[in-house]
Structure formats: C-alpha cells, structure tokens
Amino acid sequence: MVSGNAVDWFVDRHVAEGSGARVAFRDAWRALSYGELASASAAFAGALTVAGVGREQRVLLLLQDTVDFPVAFWGAMRAGAVPVPINTLLTAETVGTILADCRAAAVVISAGLVERLGGALRSAGVARVIVSQSDGLADGVDGWGGFAGFLAGGDPATPSVAAAGDEVAFWLYSSGSTGAPKGVRHVHSSLRCTAETYAAKVLGIGPDDVMFSAAKAFHAYGLGNSLTFPASVGACSVLLAERPTPDAVLDVMRTYQPTLFGGVPTLYAGLLANPMISPGAGSARLRRCISAGEALPADIGRRWKSVVGVDILDGIGSTEMLHIFISNHPDDVRYGSSGRPVPGYEARIVDEHDRPVAHGEAGELVVRGDSSADGYWNRRVRSRRTFQGEWTYTGDTYTRDAEGYFRFQGRSDEMLKVSGVWVSPFEVEEALISHPAVLEAAVIGRADSDGLVKPKAFVIRRDDVDTIGVDALVAELQAHVKGRIGVWKYPRWIEFVDSLPKTATGKIQRFRLREV
C-alpha cells in the first residue's frame, strides 16, 4: 500500500526532479507549470489555514475545468482538508442537499455559476466562499472574495501535511444515474493506484503526451484523465471550461493538438455526426482515444476507427473504484465488449446467491483492486451492500465469454424479463444505434395492456439522414432490431425525442424515462 500525501508525488515530485518548468495545465486563458502549480496549491493550503478551515473538513469544489481546479483540489489536500468536486450542472436544490450532507466548511465556485447556485450556498450558511474566474472584480462576485485574492493570503511555501496512504483524501459524489448522489470517500493511495495501473498499462501515457478529457474533472473518469494521469508522468493536460459540445471539442483538438483524448459514447456519436469530423478529429498527433461512463456501442467504435483512424479503448469504471478497471487494450480491441481486467484488478460475475456464473450467463459484476473507495458517507447499509471485504459490487449486469472478455448488459435494476427471458436494454439500444437513421437510443421496460413488460425505446434521429414517415420508420427500426438480436427483443413502442435525460458524464438516466 502506497503511503504519503498524494500531493507530494503528483505535484512536488516534479519540482524536486527539476521539471518544474514543464507545463502542467492549459485552459483558454493561461498555462500553469508544475512549479507554479506547486506554489499556488501551497498558497491555497496556507489560505485555508488562515481562514480557519481545518484538517478533514470538507471543501466543496463547484468548478468548471480551468487551471483553478487543480490548484484548489491539490491545495485542499495539501492542507489536510478534503476536496469534494461536484457536478456543475446540478440543480440548486441538489447542491443544497449535498452541502448539507458533506457539511462543507468552504466552497470554491466558478463565477459563471454564482447566479444559478449562489442562493443554495447562502441558504446553507457556508462560512467561506471563494469565487474562481473573478479577475477584474474587486470584491469578487455577490460579495464573496475572488480566487486570486484568497491565494494572496496564503504562504506559497506551505508544506503538505503528513498523511497516511489509507487516510481519506477527497470525496466524489456518484453521478446519480439511478437516484440521489452518494458521497464516495477515497484515500490518498487510490490516486496513485489508478495511475500505475490503467494510466500506465492501458493508456500508456508518457511525459510528452498532451491529454484532453471532454469528461469533466468533477467526475472520477475525468479526474483521472485531466488531473492525475498527466501529473503521474509530468505531462500536460488541456482543460475546457465550457460544455463539451462537438464543435467545442473539435476546436480544442485543432488548437492544442492533443495526443490522448477521453470522451463518452454520446460525445463520440455527436462528433461522428459533425460535418467537421476528419482524420485525427482535428489533431495530427492523436494516437489514443478512450471511453467510459457508459458502454460504447460497437457501431460507434467501428465508425470512429474508420473516419478518425484511431481506435477507441472502451472500458468500465465507477466512482466507487475511481477509474477504469476493465478495458480494451491498444493491441486487443473488441468492439461491443468492455475488454478484460486492467492489470492490478480482478473481476468476476456472480448470481443472486454470490455464486460464479458460467461463461455467457448474466450476473452482477464484482471487482477487486486497491483503488476501491473507503465507503459511502452516512450510508452504512448501502456501504455494506457495495463494499464486501476486498470486493466491490458494481450493480452492473455483465456476461463474460470463454476468452475472458466482459460484455455489458445493463444495470442490475434495469434488466427486462421479456417472454420469460432476460433482455439487456443496452443490447436493444446498440441494435437501434446501428441503424443509419439513429443517433442515440434509450430503452426501458413498459407494461403492455396485459401487464407484461416489454421494451420501449426513446430514439433521437440523425439530422444528416433522410428518413421516411414516422410509422414507416418505426416499423423499419423494429424489423432491424429483430434481424440483429432476436424477434422477442424488439421495442414494442418507439418514441422519437429531441434529447435524452443524462448525467453530466453522459450516462442515460433511464429512471427519469420511466417517470414520463
């Protein structure tokens, strides 16, 4: 087990080794070297102490992806406080719930979020609020002080507190794809674990790489991509503050020429539908793409490889495990599968009695690895269900074939029993997406007139494909699904929509579709 404050290894090590001048982060406004990151995060830590924010107290980060994010994240951890990055797209009500749950002693918020979320901070009575991206505003925003002014009150030589590898370092809140977010507690050593497993042995990141993650840093997947993986080798990370629309992402790709790109399936589909997509997605240096957040439909992976010229390494991770623990590998890509376990992790599939299932049979995916969380905050019953000894129970239904490749079937509480046979919503969605008229799809269960559950699909049509009438297209899509995966699995109802409810990380919130 690795011991020590994670800041020492991810930040200060590079300065000590003479690499302090290397660029660590770039956003649309500035670049930050490793030396500047070390000084700024130390000043943030010192300023927290001056402000009376003590060890183990939570510091909520409501931050867009700019260079202030790593300064606040590493700075809080350096001080022994616990940074808690959360989704910047949450409603004010949900932010208020999280504030009450984590009892934050301070909040760092991007200026552009104050109008929408500032009321929740005032209602929660947060003692200290620091506003990022507030340059030029003498009094910060809404009466709160600015980030630069806060840093000026801290000593840039503040040392990191001594911490054990098993000490809780930061929290993440689960994305809420199946309900209310839960506070997930992670320890210092987990960050280095994911860097030395997935980042080193699958992503293959090196010091000369430039990483761009469209997935935001408040999410476990984006946190690894943007903050810890580049810092593990002294590489550079490009940060995008705005929403990662296809146009915005392609602009970043052209401007900064990243070598590594991290996206989610929804974004890859949107990029492929963008008329500006080209080899390298705009970057002549692009050598590797990765995907997580939700399973990647095989058709999207194959089309991306054909158009962009680079494979997408799809994998599965979770907030509870911090990053990807099963993945396709650079020399071993099987589209339609999540791949095989990342070196350093073990995975198995069990039935409802915790017994291993046979190859090809569906069951719950459980995983073992050193990046597993310390548990949920104030969720004892849920913690005991999810974290059992060394094994983490994911709640995902998977199959594994005889060669050891894992295939996603759906969340365990989303599987459909149709005509006495289990049907995977993802399998139906994947079949629909393989039709040229479909951009995205989501499938849920709905009872028919006899009370029997059958698949219902919500479909977003592609704009660049001529389609026939609605009724004819429904019939064509139903026939397409029957021909690909079986006559009993086709969606009995298809509803065309303009958008699907999702978390900020791209996961479809099927529970919201069931409420429609």
Image (tube, rainbow, N blue to C red):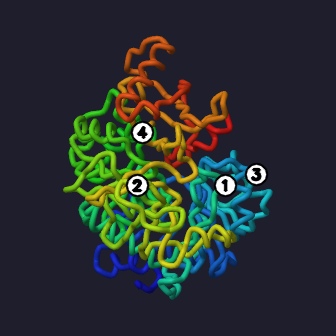
Q: CA distance from mark 3 to mark 4?
A: 29 Å
Q: Secondary structure at mark 1?
A: loop
Whichever of labels 3 and 4 marks the residue nearer the N terminus, that label is 3
Q: Which residue is mark 4?
A: 248
- Number of other residues with Cα within 10 Å of mark 2, as a class: few under 14, some 14 to 19, many 20 or more: some
Front disc: 3 or 1: 1
Where is residue 480? Give x, y as percent: 38, 26
In the image, what residue occupies the spot 60% across and 47% down? 89
Amino acid found under the numbered disc labelled 2: Glu
Taking the view exactly as shown, the residue that stands out farthest to the front is 420
Front disc: 3 or 2: 2
Amino acid found under the numbered disc labelled 1: Ala
Q: CA distance from mark 4 to mark 2?
A: 41 Å
Where is residue 339? Give x, y as percent: 31, 56
Q: Is residue 257 visible?
A: no
Q: CA distance from mark 2 to mark 1?
A: 30 Å
Front disc: 1 or 4: 1
Q: Is residue 276 above or below residue 296?
A: above
Q: Which residue is mark 3?
A: 119
Amino acid found under the numbered disc labelled 4: Ala
- The residue lying toward the viewer, choosing from 279 and 451, is 451
Tell me, for residue 180, which label it has, or none: 1
